Amino acid sequence: MEKAPATARGIEFGYGATVAVLVPLPLASAYDYLVPEGVTVALGDFVVVPLGPRQVKGVVWAAGTGEVSADRLRDIVGVLDVPPMLLAQREFLAWVSDYTLASMGSVLKLAMSVPAALVPPKPQTGYALGSETPSRMTPARSRVLDEAGAHPPRTAVELARAARVTPSVVKGLAELGALVPVQITPKSEFGQPDPTTQGPTLSASQTKAAKTLIGAVQASDFSVTLLDGVTGAGKTEVYLDAVAETLRQGKQALVMVPEISLTSQWLERFQRRFGAPPGEWHSDLTASKRRATWRAVAENTISVVVGARSALFLPYPNLALIVVDEEHDGSYKQEDGVIYNARDMAVVRARVGAFPAILVSATPSLETIVNTQSGRYARVHLVDRHGEAELPHIETVDMRADPPTRDHWLSPIVTDAIKAELEGGSQAMVFLNRRGYAPLTLCRTCGHRMECPNCSAWLVEHRHTGHLECHHCGHRVRQPVSCPECGALESLAACGPGVERLAEEIAALFPLARTAVMASDTVTGPAAAAALVQAMANHEFDILIGTQIVAKGHHFPLLTVVAVVDADLGLSGGDLRATERTYQLLSQVAGRAGRAERPGRAYLQTYHPDHPVMAALISGDRDAFLEREAEAREAQLLPPFGRLVALIISGPDAGAVERFARGVARAAPAQKDVRVLGPAPAPLSMLRGRHRHRLLLRAARSVNVQGYVRQWLGGIKTPSGLRLQVDVDPYSFL
């Protein structure tokens, strides 16, 4: 694909011309409008147009279609004062729409997620040196006038701070005419990272890898490189060299991370390296911060953005590098609205813009590995940990041979190992990928199980809040004192462990140890995550108990032992990636141990010590595991060797959902190398009060599945009250 030119404005249209304007609503195409007298618009301009009885913001997408005569068209209301959406981004959005089968308007909404940012910030009042001289001069007044004469106009607060006075002194001088108010444009609140600062000393292998990545940036052309390195290999410092090269060229870089709230150590490392923080983009930003960040990206005053998957749709005018850290992580898959995989879309964005993408992981996805083997992606490999650190020794704990005592969850082997490490001044991590206190609550008298009324799922007990919660829809009730079914008092029993229950056991086993729980419902936002991570790094805690968020790249120098409770948890179910995901998660968790001078050990409590995942983790032979996984997938024509598309039909009436799903299945066109499975009730057959059926299309790689699905669904009208979602390349099979 040719590189899209980064011109300031596209083709221009003057008075009387017809243009197609796309608006961020679930509409399939743009609508034609007339350019009014005295107005000129260009492709990519943000405009205001009438739509029915209201006015909406949109983007000039193309020349008018001519499908509606000019005398029936309405005028554009006005052009917004914001940099236009450039050709590269418009081409990218069109590609996303075509691939995901989402409407163009829905995809545009991802790029126009902050409508307030389309309006320039209001000018501020600044103060410049006036012509009057105060009759009474004080040292404070002299300092203010000296500052005003030596610098451009500033706000009263800024001028007062520089002169070491209160704002009232500034305002008093303005009333006397010694200072005059002027309108100033608010200055950017974002600092500029310095690419000339020296990073840490790299090892020989890191230096070689960094040179490869820097070369990709210097080539200024599309490429994809996998930075494949064991946990603790120093991959971040390597790809930051590529970011530095991008900055030296005066261009923008995007670093994508799976969970921005858990990257406090990354942000600290970035600021230490470049002297200024990057721009952040994630759901925890305030509305004003989102507005300022979106605008600053569009105006090219932010040079580096670190963000979650939605950061991919920001309006970069000068983007020249995308880094996808932890590229294997399932969090990059957006499951609602426009359903897309941000890792894959990042590669597309790089291809459209003709610049490099870097995928980073210690446990790359099978899709990425296959792409490196086929030559589509380049690969640089860091096989050793940085410095003197060594990879942890991993062993399984057979729960059949060494079970815990009754009503406990830690094997004696694990408790003995934790005790020994704590006595030596080290830290421990206990991992269980299950939030809350217990995953199931049942009545000992009648056997009633506490279920969510909106989903086909059990309610999870959260003892620290006294509630039962659904982790799918958020339904929440107080813990009842009696069984809702039979009325028996104090008969409800917690079944199975969550991290809260595990923390309770650990507190009893190690009463002198300082413990903390790290889970998505106990760590609320970036500030809380940063505080907890820093406290752990400072050895304010001895034992960290957590869910999968503890596996996201954290570096704790004194952490030497990791214990995984219920290591088999992710192996069940019909997910085609279950074994791969379990391997990745357990490898990442184990990789938290021994990242500094002290050696590390990891214990996997399992009832299946001979499972291929456990064997691969113990042997450290990742490539052999992936080879077997690839053979199994290829034999069944599953990704990355085949194509999958899921159709999810939902609605409030179970019978209507099933009937419509069967009708959709019957309408599937017959085609070679395509098989439609289902419909069948989804494993989560009810979600948020809606009954659900699924169909799964399986096809050869050579099949244009988007074209097939368009043909299939083109003549089908979805009944009122029902919803039909299409998920190309599904990750979730619930």
Image (tube, helix red, strand yellow):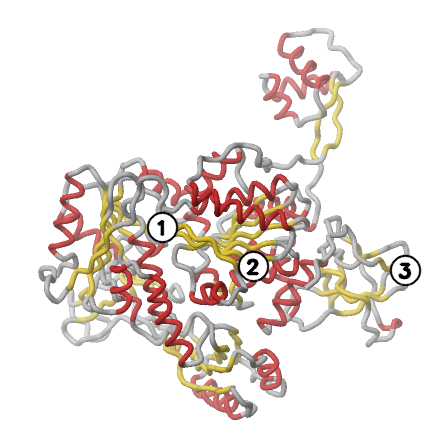
How far apart marks 3 and 1 lie (CA) works out to: 60 Å
Image position of 668 with respect to 292: above or below: below
Mark toward the viewer: 3 or 1:
1
Q: What element carries label 1?
A: loop
Look at 66% across and 12% down and name the residue there. 141
Name the disc covering residue 346, or none: 2
Depth check, front residue: 204 or 199: 204
Quarter that holds the C terminus: bottom left
Q: Where is residue 431 in the image (x, y as percent from the top left)?
A: 26, 55
Residue at the disc numbered 3: 15
Q: In which quarter of the image is residue 101?
A: bottom right
Q: Where is residue 621 in the image (x, y as percent from the top left)?
A: 31, 61
The disc labelled 1 sits on which kind of residue?
A: Thr
How many numbered circles does the render carry?
3
Name the disc covering residue 62, or none: none
Residue at the disc numbered 1: 231
Look at 82% across and 76% down and name the residue there. 67
Depth check, front residue: 601 or 209: 209
Look at 22% across and 59% down and name the residue there. 604
Quarter that holds the N terminus: bottom right
Image position of 733 with respect to 624: above or below: below
The disc labelled 2 sits on which kind of residue?
A: Ala
Local crowd size for mark 1, using a 10 Å CA cut-off: few (<14), some (14–19), many (≥20) = many
Give left or right: position of 293 versus 612.
Answer: right
Q: Where is residue 645 in the image (x, y as percent from the top left)?
A: 50, 78
Mark toward the viewer: 3 or 2:
2
Image position of 177 with respect to 400: above or below: above
Q: In which quarter of the image is residue 451?
A: bottom left
Mark 2 or mark 1, which has the lower sequence index? Answer: 1
Q: Is mark 2 on a helix, strand or loop?
A: helix
Q: What element carries label 3?
A: loop
Give left or right: position of 381 versus 286.
Answer: left
